[in-house]
Image (spheres, rainbow, N blue to C red):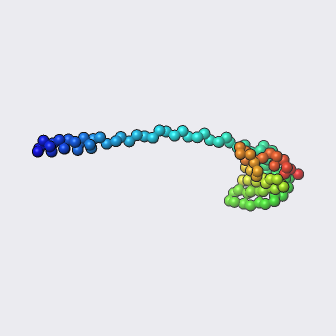
Amino acid sequence: MSRKIALLSLLLLAGCAARPVAVAPAPVPIPQAPPQRVEPPAFAGLSTDALRARLGTPAFSRKDGATDMWRYDTKTCHAFFFLTGGTVNHIETIPRAADAAADPACLNALRK
């Protein structure tokens, strides 16, 4: 009987020792960042006065904290100018290409 108990004890101990080892998952590659969108040079950095002189009064404007947004409209597109500290720091248009924030044809159509 003691032999059976000893054998059973050994089997139980062996079962405890055979715990599965955790395997670290394979590393997942980090996707590359999308290409930077460059602001159109004809408008980037313009002051509020220079933007008004070039495009006139915006169809709509609003202020969110330190940022002003001015919207200009044509029949085929809308342009949004984001100004911080009195200068243009970002421009977007609707419609636009997937790889650009602003469509040059829309911006050219806005000029007086």
Q: Quadrant of residue 36?
A: top right
Seen in the image, is 8 located left or right of residue 20?
A: left
The location of residue 8, given as percent across then percent down, is 19, 44
Instruction: Compare residues 23 and 55 and report the one nearer the observer.
Output: 23
Query: Which residue appears at 84% of the width and 51% of the height?
Result: 110
| Image mark count | 0
Residue 76 percent location from the top left of the image: 82, 53
Residue closest to the eye, 37 or 82: 37
Residue 105 appearing in the image = yes
The quarter of the picture where the N terminus appears is: top left
23 w.r.t. 65: above or below: above
Residue 38 lies, in percent from the top left, at 72, 43
Taking the image as shown, residue 56 lies to the left or right of residue 5, namely right
The residue positioned 17% from the left and 41% from the top of the image is 7
Q: Is residue 3 left or right of residue 66?
A: left
Place of residue 89 in the rendered image (x, y in percent of width and height, measured from the top left): 73, 49
Q: Residue furthest right?
A: 112
Q: Which residue appears at 27% of the width and 41% of the height?
A: 17
In this view, which residue lies farthest toward the left? 1
The residue depicted at 15 percent of the width and 45 percent of the height is 5
Q: Quadrant of residue 31?
A: top right
Give the side of residue 4 with respect to residue 112, left or right: left
Does the image show residue 49?
no
71, above or below 107, in the image: below
